[in-house]
């Protein structure tokens, strides 16, 4: 009982520390530095502590101080309650969804069974969809409650876009569910121990469609029409400043991490190294005793998972700074006239293969 | 512990439902309805129906209510519009109907002795995706298919209502290829 509690607390602290303490601030820096490198600029390099700049990493700290001391502005005529609630509504789902994504397998440590996922739900994947669909309200309410026409247009765009891509995203992963026969993310992870059973080989089309939908759902370029700077100032968060603005921004970055986690779990073998089964890993570390072998295997698996996650974060960042923004009608057309039919075809073909 | 969570969720559901009816702004009403649905999803989780809870959040709270909000915001509905204040006969009828329903439910609850759920075989499987799916596609296949056909009819109706008519002169210039309206 006590061991279970310690295990749960350790896992929660690890994931929260990783997401809020590491990924959120560092991604803010990566976003700037990578864009600078890709556009042949130098990028953030001024913040220093005793003359050390560490390639601009201290800008994360400077940003935090700036944001915390900034005026919290609410425009006249705005709905105060919803204006304050909107950033929370968009941040909380981004934090919560990571708790069903497994970041490692099952290990026996000192006679205690450790399952490296915060909450091993039977409906794991649906849980993620449920909460990411609630995130829509953050953008919609933020746009509506600001009493600003640009914000309202941004909110309207966000609601239609996120709703449409949610529908398509749900259909793109049906193929994966048919292949693995489970909604439980840990089970899907276990079934990808064999390299040739990875999701990317079983469902290549599903992967491309899912990643597209996920980026659109996260409202990042090339799908950032709800906040299109050149048309509607900053869209739904035009009237936000200080901490509340940063909450929208953190929600976006945490969603990048979550998307990478889902992609890794569904399509890229979760915590498994290619061609190496769990048994091989354990026997390789046998020199450290059975507990030591478990711990070492666990560390290797966690590292594997997060390296894959970081790769997909990098990929999303690269896409974001490579492609120009779509026009709004193109965004909707892509969803309803291309991705939706393609994912239906994908489901149909998967079904045919299974019937054969 | 479970009872405490139940009370929190139940009170939250009732209070947000009352707020939905009493609040004057359409957006506040819609948000209260969403809160009610989230609390109801929590109640489903307490009843071990995880799948239903997730679907409640995805379909009702996540999709349908976003459309509600979208329409409210798009039309910019004023708080004065759409009140049912004058229609007292209808209100009275509705109130009687609602009270009658609550009464019927209470009677059946008391009669059943407080236990509504009867767990048969595979009680530990109750509420899982597999169990619900199997029931849907074997025992309740006919109602399931009828509901699907109903939804299909609704979809076809929506498409017919929303599509542009080619022979409509007002909209003719909007369907010229390459021209973006």
Image (cartoon, rainbow, N blue to C red):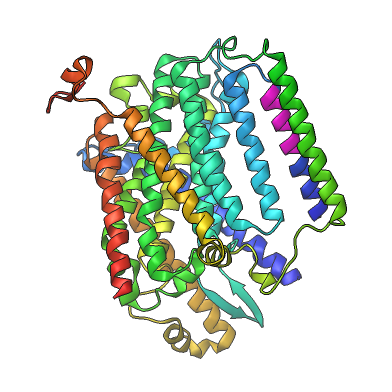
**Is residue A35 in the magenta section?**
no
Residue B125 falls in which quadrant of the image?
Answer: bottom right
Residue B20 relative to residue A253: left or right: right
Q: Is residue B157 above or below residue A311?
A: above
Q: Is residue A218 visible?
A: no
What residue is rendered at 67% in x and 48% in y?
B42
Quadrant where the C terminus of chain B sits is top left
What residue is rendered at 39% in x and 39% in y?
B155
Q: Is residue A280 visible?
A: yes
Q: Where is residue A48 shown, x and y percent of the image?
A: 42, 38
Front residue (pair A105, A153):
A153
What residue is rendered at 63% in x and 23% in y?
A81
* Residue segment shown in magenta: B11-21
**Is residue B16 in the magenta section?**
yes
Q: Is residue A256 above or below residue A311?
A: above
Quadrant where the N terminus of chain B sits is bottom right
Q: Is residue A324 above or below residue A76?
A: below
């Amino acid at each position: 009982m006590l061991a279970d509690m310690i295990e749960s607390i350790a896992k929660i602290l690890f994931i929260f520390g990783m997401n809020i303490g590491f990924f959120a601030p560092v991604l803010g820096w990566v976003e700037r530095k990578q864009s600078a490198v890709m556009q042949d600029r130098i990028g953030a390099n001024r913040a220093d502590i005793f003359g050390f700049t560490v390639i601009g990493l201290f800008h994360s700290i400077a940003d935090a101080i700036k944001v915390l001391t900034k005026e919290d502005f609410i425009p006249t005529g705005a709905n105060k309650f919803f204006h304050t609630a909107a950033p929370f509504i968009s941040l909380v789902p981004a934090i919560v969804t990571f708790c069903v994504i497994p970041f490692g397998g099952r290990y026996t440590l000192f006679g205690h069974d450790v399952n490296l996922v915060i909450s091993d739900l039977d409906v794991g994947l649906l849980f993620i969809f449920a909460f990411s669909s609630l995130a829509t309200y953050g953008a919609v309410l933020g746009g509506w409650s600001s009493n600003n026409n640009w914000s309202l247009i941004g909110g309207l765009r966000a609601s239609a876009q996120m709703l449409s891509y949610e529908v398509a995203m749900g259909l793109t992963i049906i193929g994966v569910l048919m292949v693995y026969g489970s909604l439980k993310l840990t089970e899907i992870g276990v079934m990808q121990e064999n390299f040739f059973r990875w999701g990317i080989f079983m469902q290549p089309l599903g992967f491309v469609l899912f990643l597209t939908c996920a980026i659109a759902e996260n409202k990042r370029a090339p799908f950032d029409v709800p906040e299109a700077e050149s048309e509607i100032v900053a869209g739904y968060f035009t009237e936000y400043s200080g901490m509340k603005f940063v909450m929208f921004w953190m929600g976006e970055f945490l969603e990048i991490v979550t998307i990478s986690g889902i992609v890794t779990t569904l399509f890229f073998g979760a915590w498994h190294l290619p061609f190496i089964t769990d048994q091989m890993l354990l026997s390789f570390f046998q020199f450290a005793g059975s507990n030591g072998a478990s711990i070492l295997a666990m560390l290797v698996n966690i590292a594997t998972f997060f390296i894959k996650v970081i790769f997909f974060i990098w990929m999303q960042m690269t896409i974001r700074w490579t492609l120009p923004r779509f026009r709004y009608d193109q965004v909707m057309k892509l969803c309803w006239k291309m991705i939706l039919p393609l994912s239906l075809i994908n489901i149909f073909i998967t079904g045919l293969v299974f019937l054969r | 512990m479970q009872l405490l969570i139940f009370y929190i969720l139940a009170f939250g559901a009732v209070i947000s439902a009352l707020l939905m009816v009493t609040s004057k702004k359409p957006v506040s009403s819609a948000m209260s309805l969403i809160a009610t649905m989230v609390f109801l999803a929590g109640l489903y989780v307490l009843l071990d129906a995880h799948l239903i809870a997730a679907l409640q959040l995805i379909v009702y709270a996540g999709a349908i209510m976003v459309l509600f909000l979208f329409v409210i915001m798009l039309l910019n509905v004023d708080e004065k519009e759409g009140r049912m204040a004058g229609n007292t006969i209808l209100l009275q009828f509705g109130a009687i109907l609602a009270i009658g329903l609550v009464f019927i439910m209470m009677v059946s609850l008391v009669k059943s002795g407080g236990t509504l759920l009867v767990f048969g075989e595979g009680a530990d499987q109750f509420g899982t995706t597999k169990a619900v799916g199997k029931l849907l596609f074997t025992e309740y296949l006919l109602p399931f298919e009828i509901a699907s056909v109903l939804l299909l009819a609704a979809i076809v109706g929506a498409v017919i209502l929303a599509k542009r008519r080619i022979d409509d002169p007002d909209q003719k210039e909007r369907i010229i290829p390459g021209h973006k309206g």
